[in-house]
Image (cartoon, helix red, strand yellow):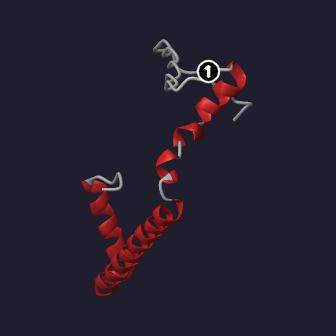
Amino acid sequence: MLGIQFPEFVLLVVAALFVFGPDRLPSIAAQAARLLRQLRETSSGVRAELREVVGPELADLDLTSLDPRRAVSRALLDVDDDRPTPPAPRPAPLPSTDAPPPFDADAT
């Protein structure tokens, strides 16, 4: 649910209880649910209107051409294929040492 796990959700509920109080929290939750429902209805209405206005051209719309990686590779490397760009290689991890990091008293 929105990238929130159970412990984070519980923490948010407890924080909301402290901020709004147990008396106002149900009405605020109802208002939030009403707002969310209105936003969903509005977005579905906009989508339906967009489908009606644009029609079959909506299916022909190529959103992958808006990928910044592909745009840069096309501009710089003259690559004009439809293959996805591979992810950048990860740098090698730094060697671990038991020595403490250097400390510069003048820099801090």
Answer with the quarter of the image where residue 45 lies. bottom left
Instruction: Please state which of residues 10 and 18 is positioned toward the viewer in this rendering.
Output: 10
**Residue 70, relative to residue 28: is it above or below?**
above
Position of residue 59 measured from the top left corner of the image (x, y, whole percent): 46, 49
As drawn, which residue projects farthest toward the right? 106
Picture residue at 56% right of the left edge, 21% below the top: 101
Up the image or down, 9 lies above or below 25; here it is above
- Camera-nearest residue between 86 and 90: 86
Q: Is residue 63 left or right of residue 8?
A: right
Under mark 1, the amino acid is Pro
Q: Which residue is mark 1?
A: 102
| Of residues 69 and 19, the one drawn nearer to the viewer in this rendering | 69
Q: Position of residue 4 (x, y in %)?
A: 33, 54
Q: Residues within 10 Å of mark 1 (few under 14, many from 20)?
A: few
- What's the residue at 40%, 77% (across, down)? 38
Position of 99 relative to 69 (above/below): above
Q: Position of residue 52 (x, y in %)?
A: 47, 65
